[in-house]
Image (cartoon, helix red, strand yellow):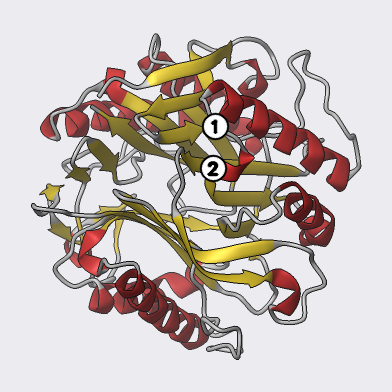
């Protein structure tokens, strides 16, 4: 399958001082699947639409997504998943009311994050959208106004199930019917209780979609404090024993509601006639994150190939022999991360030219331009869909950046 890269543009938004080394595409279409760059209210001339107005920025952001989808042969109705990043939870109602109006009766699955920053300080919202052209089955639809008393006019679903890929709402410690919460406290054991219910929810939802936990290719784990890390990962390990997904772990300032300490996203590809190929499987307690080992007791791997799709573990300045590079230097860490990416893609029978989406996490906006420059230089001529956010932290304090990579061959 040859992805079609649409609406290419230079990467100036990620470098306030000038252009970066490579271009990005606002959309990449691979068959019926559309990968989109993170959309904001940033205009091509570098100005921001709706300055200081979260609702106006959300409108401009949805306009950008709509344009990219139309170039792909689709529309807003084809959206399967939204990851909405806000810089302040106080903007949530304004932004989600706009999304609810623009996506009325679409019922996407969603994950809502509060992040430490976006590519420009003036930006208040970024939306990463995913889409499948031709329709998916929406399961367990609901209205957010009925969800824990939130006065927000937004409609969603727990599952958007396609023929090949299953999209799931980010799962937390909330019961699937909104009837209650696990772990109503701020202790590590509360985060573990939320993780346990979230993984139980995932199993239930995948079963209803005709799949199972064994079809999970990637997990992305969001927690609000690094202190929860050693509590939640053994819970994940127990639920996903022997499955070996790839994993990215991110610490964010907050999630959609104050009581949420944990959220997990899962990328799921139906295995069909054959099992997914897991590259470099490992047990997490036996490896280092940065310079430290952590007793996490999880089965992970470095890459998963599921049909034509390849997804990698989030790559950092730790090389594939577990040696940390670039202490205190985000650019050097990015160089090592991209060297890892090239090796892992090759081991999964893919290459840098096959990359359709790259997502960069940095722990300080000051690192953003340099890290994005490295990532896009390694992807020069590829023009992937691209997103970048500033987060509170990563798996260990030494890690200043991480990059997620998805490829289609």
212 or 313, which is in the foreground? 212
> In the rendering, at what x and y percent does residue 263 appear?
50, 67
232 or 5, which is in the foreground? 5
> In the rendering, at what x and y percent does residue 60 appear?
79, 33
Answer few, some or many: residues within 10 Å of disc 2's Cα (few below 14, many 20 plus, some between 14 and 19).
Answer: many
> In the rendering, at what x and y percent does residue 13 appear?
66, 21
User: Which residue occupies 73% across, 36% down?
Assistant: 61
Task: Check the image and report above or below for 8 versus 213.
Answer: above
Location of the N terminus (image quadrant): top left
Q: Residue furthest front?
A: 134
User: Which residue occupies 65% across, 60% down?
Assistant: 253
Task: Check the image and report above or below for 333 versus 85.
Answer: above
> In the rendering, at what x and y percent does residue 78 appear?
54, 42
> Secondary structure beneath disc 2?
helix
58 or 192, which is in the foreground? 58
Tell me: 215 left or right of 104. left
Location of the C terminus (image quadrant): top left
Tell me: 250 left or right of 40. left
Tell me: 138 left or right of 337. right
> Secondary structure beneath disc 1?
loop
When asked about the image quadrant of residue 108, the answer is bottom right
Answer few, some or many: residues within 10 Å of disc 1's Cα (few below 14, many 20 plus, some between 14 and 19).
Answer: some
Is the Cβ of the residue at disc 1 closer than 8 Å to that at disc 2?
yes
User: Which residue occupies 89% across, 35% down?
Assistant: 50
User: Which residue occupies 55% across, 45% down?
Assistant: 79
What residue would you read off at disc 1?
74
What residue would you read off at disc 2?
78
Report how far apart the C-alphas of labels 1 and 2 lie in the structure.
Answer: 6 Å
Q: Residue furthest left?
A: 274
Residue 230 in sight in this render: yes
Residue 329 in sight in this render: no
Tell me: 6 left or right of 320. right
């Amino acid at each position: 399958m040859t992805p079609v890269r649409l609406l290419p543009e230079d990467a100036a938004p990620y470098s306030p001082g000038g252009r970066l080394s490579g271009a990005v595409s606002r959309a990449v279409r691979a068959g019926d699947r559309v990968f989109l760059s993170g959309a904001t209210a940033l205009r091509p001339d570098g100005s921001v639409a709706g300055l200081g107005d979260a609702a106006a920025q959300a409108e401009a952001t949805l306009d950008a997504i709509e344009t990219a989808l139309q170039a792909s042969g689709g529309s807003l109705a084809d959206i399967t998943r939204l990851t909405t990043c806000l810089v302040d939870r106080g903007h949530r109602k304004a932004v989600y009311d706009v999304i609810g109006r623009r996506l009325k009766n679409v019922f996407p699955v969603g994950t809502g994050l509060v992040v430490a920053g976006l590519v420009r300080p003036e930006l208040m919202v970024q939306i990463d959208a995913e889409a499948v052209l031709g329709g998916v089955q929406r399961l367990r639809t609901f209205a957010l106004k009925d969800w824990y008393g939130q006065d927000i006019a937004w409609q969603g679903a727990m599952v958007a199930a396609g023929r090949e890929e299953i999209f799931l709402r980010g799962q937390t410690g909330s019961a699937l019917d909104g009837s209650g919460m696990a772990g109503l406290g701020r202790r590590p054991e509360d985060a573990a209780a939320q993780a346990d219910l979230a993984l139980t929810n995932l199993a239930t939802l995948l079963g209803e979609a005709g799949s199972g936990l064994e079809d999970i290719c990637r997990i992305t784990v969001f927690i609000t404090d690094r202190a929860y890390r050693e509590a939640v990962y053994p819970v994940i390990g127990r639920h996903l024993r022997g499955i070996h997904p790839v994993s990215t772990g991110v610490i964010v300032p907050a999630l959609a509601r104050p009581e949420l300490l944990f959220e997990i996203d899962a990328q799921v590809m139906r295995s069909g006639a054959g099992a997914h190929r897991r590259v470099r499987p490992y047990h997490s307690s036996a490896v280092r994150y940065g310079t430290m080992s952590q007793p996490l007791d999880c089965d992970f791997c470095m890459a998963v190939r599921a049909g034509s799709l390849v997804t990698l573990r989030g790559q950092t300045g730790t090389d594939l022999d577990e040696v940390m590079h670039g202490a205190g230097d985000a650019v050097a860490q990015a160089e090592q991360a991209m060297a890892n990416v090239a090796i892992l893609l090759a081991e999964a029978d893919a290459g840098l030219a096959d990359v359709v989406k790259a997502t960069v996490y940095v722990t300080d906006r000051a690192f953003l331009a340099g890290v994005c420059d490295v990532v896009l230089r390694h992807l020069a001529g590829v023009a992937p869909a691209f997103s970048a956010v500033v987060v509170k932290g990563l798996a260990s304090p030494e890690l200043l950046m991480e990059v997620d990579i998805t490829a289609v061959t």
